[in-house]
């Protein structure tokens, strides 16, 4: 992959499910990985990156538009444009 995205990165600190996020973070083979979630996870992310020799660049963003939940399932990729994101 050119880029990977891991959502809810704060779950990496969860005692029961954190291993799944750790495996995703350390196992994702992409030159660029974006992590979203609670900033309290940054300390652990920095520690893991230090162990692996990877660089961390922190970027903070503000939501520019409201999130909207679609009423029906998306199943038509013909109108997808570069920059579109599916969550």
Image: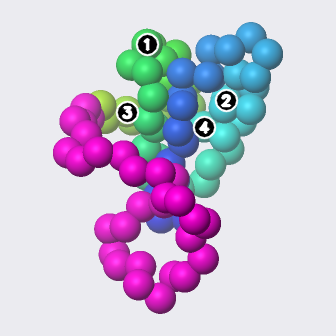
Q: Nearer the viewer, mark 1 or mark 3?
A: 1
- Residue 39 appears in the picture as rendered: yes
Q: Is residue 18 left or right of residue 10?
A: right
Tell me which label, 4 or 3, sits earlier in the chain. Answer: 4
Residue extending farthest front = 71
Estimate the spatial distance between the alpha carbons at disc 2 and disc 1, rounded to whole Å: 15 Å
Q: Tell me, yes or no, whether the two marked residues, 2 and 4, touch with CB atoms within 8 Å.
A: yes
Query: How far is disc 1 from disc 3 in space, using C-alphas?
Result: 15 Å
Closer to the camera: disc 4 or disc 3? Answer: 4
- Report the quarter where the N terminus lies: bottom right
Vertical order, 78 against 2 (above or below):
below
Kind of element beneath mark 1: helix
Q: Residues within 10 Å of mark 1 (few under 14, many from 20)?
A: few
- Label 1 vs label 4: CA separation? 16 Å
Q: Are marks 1 and 4 in contact (CB under 8 Å)?
A: no
According to the picture, the residue beneath numbered tag 1 turns out to be 40
Tell me if label 2 and label 3 are in contact, CB under 8 Å. Answer: no
Task: Where is residue 22? Give x, y as percent.
Answer: 67, 29
Position of residue 67 relative to residue 21, above or below, is below
> Sequence order check: which comes first, mark 1 or mark 4?
4
Residue of label 3: 56
Viewer-nearest residue: 33 or 37: 37
Please name the residue that numbered disc 2 is placed on.
Answer: 22
What segment is highlighted magenta in the picture? 59-87
Q: Which residue is mark 4?
A: 25
**Is residue 75 a member of the stretch shown in magenta?**
yes
Q: Residues within 10 Å of mark 4 (few under 14, many from 20)?
A: many
Which percent across, then down, holds residue 2?
47, 64
Comparing 27 with 7, the one in front is 7
Q: Quadrant of residue 76?
A: bottom right
**Sequence-earlier tag: 1 or 3:** 1
């Amino acid at each position: 992959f050119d880029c990977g995205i891991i959502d809810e990165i704060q779950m990496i600190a969860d005692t029961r499910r954190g291993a799944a996020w750790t495996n995703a973070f350390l196992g994702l083979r992409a030159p660029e990985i974006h992590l979203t979630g609670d900033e309290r996870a940054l300390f652990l992310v920095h520690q893991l990156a230090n162990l692996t020799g990877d660089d961390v660049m922190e970027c903070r963003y503000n939501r520019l538009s409201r999130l909207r939940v679609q009423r029906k399932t998306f199943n038509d990729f013909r109108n997808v444009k570069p920059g579109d994101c599916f969550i």
